[in-house]
Amino acid sequence: MQSDLLTELGNSLLTGSLNDERLMTQTSGPQAVQILPEANVIKIGGQSVIDRGRVAVFPLIEEIVENLGLHKMIIGTGAGTRARHAYSVGLDLGLPTGVLSVLGTFVSMQNARMLNYLLAKHGIPFIEPAQFAQLPHYLGERGAVIFFGMPPYIYWHGNPTVGRIPPNRTDTGSYLVSEVFGARSMIFVKDERGLYTADPKKDRAAKFIPRITVGELKELDLNDVVVERSVIELMENATHRRSIQVINGLERGNLTRALNGEHVGTIISAD
Amino acid sequence: MSGLPKGDDGRHHVQSMLMRESLLDKDVQRQTETPVFKMLPEAHVIKIGGRSVMDAGRAVVYPVVDALVGCLKTKKLIIGTGGGVRSRHVLSIGVDLGLPTGVLAQLALADSLGNAHILGSLMSPYGVVAIPPEMFGHLLPLFITSVPGVIFNGDPPYSLWEHPPQTGRIPPHRSDAGSFLLAECFGCKSLTLVKDIDGLYDRDPQSHPDANLIREIDTEELKQRNLESLPFERVLLDLLENARQLKSFQIVNGRHPDRIAAALDGEHVGTIVHANPKQRG
């Protein structure tokens, strides 16, 4: 199998095992390419933003429109309360995590379609995973594109360690888009200022944390966190997107400030 | 918004056990641990190795096809294929070009799909064909009750959304993982990985002729031993520990095709990897 046409790594991969840790250390390769270094990935919360309806969504839509031409935006949507209902029904009926993942995907798709129609007059498309090859074109032409936040794992969604809710939901799907494209930023738009020591909706004594590292966050072992735990874990292995910001989208101007690189919520970083 | 619980927090909720809850709250997560319905309890999932079987040519592939056809008489088979040498080639070029893990995963999908179609062509006289991944999951129960077996590209549809691995850039969820996750989700009877060695060894048997075969082991011990190389994807250890339905899988040598039928009958003919018994009841 030795061939002059192959790189040294090519020869090693053809003969060696992909499950060999020593060989895997050789696959970091030369410097990784940032595919869309100017793009910002924005995740719009389902329960936290879209389920609030017009009062929360319209100002955010206005802010997105104001930033067209200034910032490139890849916008992912959360699922929210209907996903919670579907998960509850599914859990009661004994359906596995993979099926719950399919159900969650449908809800985040509904939310993506709604945002799509609200932004349609600006020529901003909604794309499904199969259309991601066109994403760079839409981003170049229109400056923004909408996708559903759920990663397309469907029946192949891995189980969580505890319980049965799919662990890689819309935060994770959006985050992975920012990592794979080497995006400029990953902004999670929610209805809290950022990360607190407990759920501020239930615990008035909860303290705001403006900045934290993944290591510190793991050490705190909080019972509730503001972004999916898998985002925090994946960030540790990331090549490009090693920090994220969680902001309060109910406050006008926060999204623009975050797009401008300002610190307005909680910044969680791997380093 | 009438009929919806009043949004005193400004959000329009739908009444459910998870209403208003943070799905990231550990207490909420614990409440969602309930028994799982098995969708295809009679079907067996078999992963046919890419490099170990499909790339080895007629001398190896034809007897494996004969063995699979023999199993179809009494059993329902869901067959996944690996990408083999072509996957490794495209991965090596992709790494050299600096492309990220998600792109590598997307590229590699094409090779396992090619192998699925090769196997599907050979099994077409028996009505067993390769089904495109876009419709495979949703229509699987229809297929499996209509024909004795179906073939899919073993890779999970993670594509651009593949997780970056801890070491290097190769996608960690490949066709072993895709076959495992499918068997787990559909509550299938067994998972068998068909490779070109007798099972798991304490060292790589290709470079160490004195390596010892480990016939049976659980994930806890396997993690403790931290073997440098495994004959299956490392991520399977975590997937098995988190599995609710599959409690083990078996690795068998496709160079002894009779072992495939034996493994489906529950015989111990290769290495059986069990979930850590302490992990969950």
Image (cartoon, coloured by chain):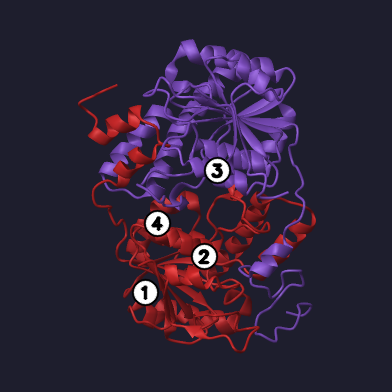
Q: Where is residue B279 in the image (x, y as percent from the top left)?
A: 65, 50
Q: Which chain does purple denote in the image?
A: B
Residue type marked 1? Leu
Q: Which of marks 4 and 3 is in front?
A: 3
Q: Could you tell me which secondary element the residue under label 4 belongs to? A: loop
Q: Which chain does red denote in the image?
A: A
Tell me whether marks 2 and 1 sit on the same chain.
Answer: yes
Q: Which of marks 2 and 3 is in front?
A: 3
Quarter of the image for residue A226 reads: bottom right
Q: Where is residue B109 in the image (x, y as percent from the top left)?
A: 45, 38
With A85 as the anchor, is A14 left or right in this view? left
In the depicted view, which residue is nearer to us: B77 or B265? Answer: B265
The residue that label 3 is drawn on is B237
The residue that label 1 is drawn on is A68
Q: Where is residue A46 in the image (x, y as percent from the top left)?
A: 59, 71
With B58 as the anchor, is A40 left or right in this view? left
The residue that label 4 is drawn on is A237
Q: Mark 4 lies on which chain?
A: A
Q: Could you tell me which secondary element the residue under label 1 belongs to? A: loop
With B116 as the anchor, is B170 left or right in this view? left
